[in-house]
Amino acid sequence: MVKRVDLQSDLFYKKAKEEGYRSRSAFKLRQIVDKFGVINEGDVVVDLGAAPGGWSQVADALVGERGMVISVDIELIERINNVVVLRTDITNEEEAIRAIRDALLSNDRNAVDVVISDASPQLSGNKDIDQFRSFELSTAALTIASALLTNPNRSNFVAKIFQGSYYNQFYTSVKAKFRYTRAYSPAASRKRSAEVYVIGKGHISTTQLSVELSVSTVF
């Protein structure tokens, strides 16, 4: 838990207040986008575990009028102009995927370009439990992304996970599904934080993987 005295001296907390962001984590996404270019104008972005909405605010500004942002969280998210808000549990992957697809159809969209997730578990104070719960959320985000990202040329993924015994397993899972995978700790992350962001670009569908394996076998 962040102490109030720490917030008062937190540069990114102050900047978030000044620039109208709902959370200081908005700067983490801005730094990720600056480095990896994962969100572009016109993209359809799904923000998983979005409350209170800082990442959705950044994504909305980046995609512009031609794009679309869908925010998903089990917690209530106050309305954000131009953003579709869905209240559902991302760990119930099938329900979340169905709700997102319905929202796409309702807005005359048929594809998702980017899935992002800054979801964090309710901290218990037990490091092992918190790391596992973070792994569960990150894995749910990856499952949802794999179902929604269908265009390999426009398919990016960003998810937070706590470093620990489950980190390598998650990173390997992302690497198996994307052509480009990197781990990154933005400058806006607190120095004592165990969080790291895994970035995937160029989603590999099951069909594509089967074709590539067949070709490699022939040659």
Image (spheres, rainbow, N blue to C red):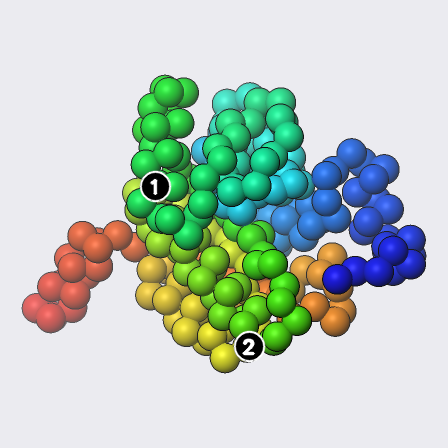
Picture coordinates of residue 23, whole percent (x, y) = 72, 44
What kind of element bears circle 2? helix
Q: Earlier in the sequence, mark 1 or mark 2?
A: 1
Quarter holding the C terminus? bottom left
Picture coordinates of residue 1, whole percent (x, y) = 75, 62
What kind of element bears circle 1? helix
Residue 100: name its quadrant: top left
Residue 10: name its quadrant: bottom right
Q: Nearer the viewer, residue 141 or 33?
A: 141
Using residue 65 as the reference point, say whether residue 100 is left or right of it.
left
Using residue 126 as the reference point, say whether residue 158 is left or right of it.
left
The residue lying at 16 percent from left, 65 percent from top is 213
Relative vertical location of residue 114 with respect to residue 20 in this rendering, above or below: below
The residue type indicated by label 1 comes to Glu
Relative vertical location of residue 149 with respect to residue 2 in this rendering, above or below: above
Residue indicated by mark 1: 95
| Marks 1 and 2, how far apart at CA | 28 Å
Residue indicated by mark 2: 128
Furthest residue toward bottom: 165
Furthest residue toward front: 124
The residue lying at 74 percent from left, 71 percent from top is 192
Picture coordinates of residue 101, whole percent (x, y) = 34, 32
Q: Residues within 10 Å of mark 2 (few under 14, many from 20)?
A: few
